[in-house]
Amino acid sequence: MADRNLLGVVALSVTAALTLTACGEDTKADTKAVAASATASVAPTTRLEQLAPAEIAVKSRLAMMKLKSFRIKGTAAVGGKEMTLDLRVAGKGNCLGTFGVEGGTGQIRWYGGYTYMTGNSKWWHAFVGEEEGVAPQQVDAFVRWLNGRWLKKPAGSTGADKAFPFCDTATLFRKSTSGTRLTRSADIEVNSTRGITLAGSDGATTRTLVVAAEGEPYYLRESIEGGEVPQLFEYSGFNKPVPLGPPPIVNTIDATQLQG
């Protein structure tokens, strides 16, 4: 019953924003960025400000893929409604975070090959939703039973897991095949860090990416405008420790034991 795709919808929304980093990338831009990194020890590193927008996008995407950990926090659109998220990622297959939607709050963990979820009643109702052929009274009873407990499933066993990219940086920061052209606008500050602003449009939707102008060109902020709900994501906690681990066993329900 908890195999709903709420997280999958969020993932698709966020992944759409992330593809901006690869918009306008081409083979020449990729080659130049890699070559610049390879020759950094024998020649001064090219200043990020001097690169073309597509080259900046390549360098920032590659920098994010090399991170051991990071944090992403913001708002996403789910069925025309706003959903908040706060996630910390620590390598492939390990991450944790919180979500909020319509007064419901939930926690999610991916660790040791398993997905763990918990939340309040409103969260579970939003996540479980209305299953075909299941009476509302049954859904209510199931949600009451889950209250205060963690639901455990093998990672990748649900539609939500398969569509949710946050624990796999290779998927999260994959190169896009979009031909969207990037342009650069005025630099801004994000949490006291100067950032270079890149923007690209796809129809009525405009996606904006801000990357650090100094040091490693990590993502600082992304936004999407033109959809049903404006979306905004901020990045921080680069290479900082993430408190990973499973929830208490006494409060954990193995979902595989509920099947059959």
Image: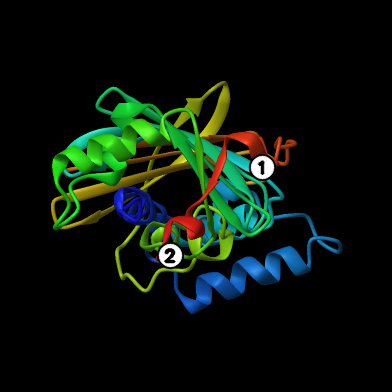
Residue 86 appears in the rendering:
no
Gap between marks 1 and 2 measured at Cα: 20 Å
Residue labelled with disc 2 = 162
Q: In the structure shown, which secondary structural element does the residue marked by tag 1 occupy?
A: loop
Q: Callout 2 environment at 10 Å: few (<14), some (14 to 19), or many (20+)?
A: some
Task: Work out which residue is located at the far front of the displayed protein and give it.
Answer: 260
Q: Secondary structure at mark 2?
A: helix
Please say if the residues under marks 1 and 2 sit with CB atoms less than 8 Å apart. Answer: no
| Amino acid type at mark 2 | Lys
Q: Picture coordinates of residue 77 (x, y %)?
A: 25, 41
Q: Pick out the residue farthest to the right.
A: 42
Query: Residue 126, position in %: x, y?
Result: 26, 38
Q: Nearer the viewer, residue 228 or 58?
A: 228
Q: Circle 1 is placed at which residue position?
A: 246
- Where 53 sits versus 28, above or below? above
Residue lying at 24% horizontally and 47% vertically, measured from the top left = 206
